[in-house]
C-alpha cells in the first residue's frame, strides 16, 4: 500500500515554498501601508463630515465590507485593464496593458480592502482622544498638523494598535488569495509544487506551518509593542495641562 501521508515531505519542501516568501511579505507590508493611508484619509473625511466626500467614503466602506475579497481581486484583475483600454481609446495613449505586473492587481484590491476595514478602527481611535487635550494644544498655538502629530496620532495609535495587529494578521492570510491575480506567493508556490508531486495534502500542511509561524511572530511583536507604548493611567502631561490652565 502506498504511503498515504509523507511526514518528511511536509518539512523538506518548506524551503522550496519559502522561495516565494518575499512576495507574500512584500504584498502584505505594501498593502498594509497603502491601506492605512486610505483608512486615515477616510477616517478624517468622515470625522470632519465633508460634504459629498463623506457620502462617497460611506459607500466605499459599505461596498468593500459587503463583498468578498476574492470578488474584489477579480474586479481589479479584469477592471484595471478595462480602464486602461478606455484611457487608450479616448485619449490616444498607448499604455501596454500586458505589461502591468500581476502584483499591481493584488496590491490594489488588498489595499482598498484594508483601507475600508481599518478606517473605522482609526476613526474610533481618533475620537477616543480627550477633547480637552486637543483644545489645550490649540490654546498653546499649535496648528492642525501639530495637534495631529503631537497629541492625536500618538494616543490614537496606542488605542488602535491591537485592532491593527489583528488586521495585519488577517491581511497576511488574505494574501493567499492573490493567486487569482497570477501572483505566485507561498500558497501558489505550494500549489505548483503539489501539482508536480501530486502531494497536495503535504504541500498545504507545509503552508499552514509557515503561516502559523509568521502569525505567531506577529502576535509576539504586537504584544511587546502594546506593553512598551501603553498609556499610563495618570500621565504627567495631564497634570501639566491642569496647572497651565489654572
Image (cartoon, rainbow, N blue to C red):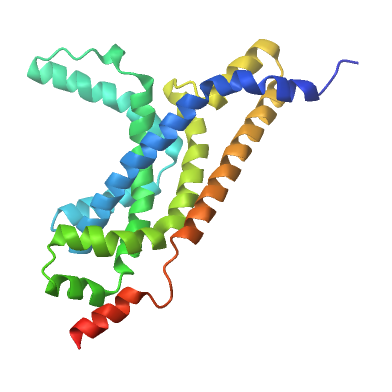
Residue farthest toward the left in the current orientation of the protein: 91
Taking 128 as reference, is 12 left or right?
Answer: right
In the depicted structure, whether residue 147 falls above or below residue 177: below
Report how many numbered discs are placed on residues in the image: 0
Taking 35 as reference, is 87 left or right?
Answer: left
Please tell me which residue is depicted at 33% across the width and 46% down the height of the picture: 36
Residue 96 position in % (x across, y down): 23, 12
Q: Nearer the viewer, residue 30 or 120?
A: 30
Residue 41 position in % (x across, y down): 23, 50
Q: Nearer the viewer, residue 211 or 218?
A: 218
Can residue 110 be seen?
no
Residue 99 position in % (x across, y down): 29, 13
Q: Nearer the viewer, residue 111 or 228?
A: 228
Residue farthest toward the bottom in the current orientation of the protein: 246
Please tell me which residue is depicted at 28% across the width and 45% down the height of the picture: 37
Q: Quadrant of residue 28?
A: top left
Residue 16 position in % (x across, y down): 61, 18
Q: Quadrant of residue 242?
A: bottom left
Can residue 210 be seen?
yes
Residue farthest toward the right in the current orientation of the protein: 1
Taking 178 as reference, is 155 left or right?
Answer: left
Q: Nearer the viewer, residue 1 or 110?
A: 110
Quadrant in the picture for the C terminus = bottom left
In the depicted structure, whether residue 226 falls above or below residue 196: below
Please tell me which residue is depicted at 63% across the width and 21% down the height of the picture: 15
Quadrant in the picture for the N terminus = top right
Amino acid at each position: 500500500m502506498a504511503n498515504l501521508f509523507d511526514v518528511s515531505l511536509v518539512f523538506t519542501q518548506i524551503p522550496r515554498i519559502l522561495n516565494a516568501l518575499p512576495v507574500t511579505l512584500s504584498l502584505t507590508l505594501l498593502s498594509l501601508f497603502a491601506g492605512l493611508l486610505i483608512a486615515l484619509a477616510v477616517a478624517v473625511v468622515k470625522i470632519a463630515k465633508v460634504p459629498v466626500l463623506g457620502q462617497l467614503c460611506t459607500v466605499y466602506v459599505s461596498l468593500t465590507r459587503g463583498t468578498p475579497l476574492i470578488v474584489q481581486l477579480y474586479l481589479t484583475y479584469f477592471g484595471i485593464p478595462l480602464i486602461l483600454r478606455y484611457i487608450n481609446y479616448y485619449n490616444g495613449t498607448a499604455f501596454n496593458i500586458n505589461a502591468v505586473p500581476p502584483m499591481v492587481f493584488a496590491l490594489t484590491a488588498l489595499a482598498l480592502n484594508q483601507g475600508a476595514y481599518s478606517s473605522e478602527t482609526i476613526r474610533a481611535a481618533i475620537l477616543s482622544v480627550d477633547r480637552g487635550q486637543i483644545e489645550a494644544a490649540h490654546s498653546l498655538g499649535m496648528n492642525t498638523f501639530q495637534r495631529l502629530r503631537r497629541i492625536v496620532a500618538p494616543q490614537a495609535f496606542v488605542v488602535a494598535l491591537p485592532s491593527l495587529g489583528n488586521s495585519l494578521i488577517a491581511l497576511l492570510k488574505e494574501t493567499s488569495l492573490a493567486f487569482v491575480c497570477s501572483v505566485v506567493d507561498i500558497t501558489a508556490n505550494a500549489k505548483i509544487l503539489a501539482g508536480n508531486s501530486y502531494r497536495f495534502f503535504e504541500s498545504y500542511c507545509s503552508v499552514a506551518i509557515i503561516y502559523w509561524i509568521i502569525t505567531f511572530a506577529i502576535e509576539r511583536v504586537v504584544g511587546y509593542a502594546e506593553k512598551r507604548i501603553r498609556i499610563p493611567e495618570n500621565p504627567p502631561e495631564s497634570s501639566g495641562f491642569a496647572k497651565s490652565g489654572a
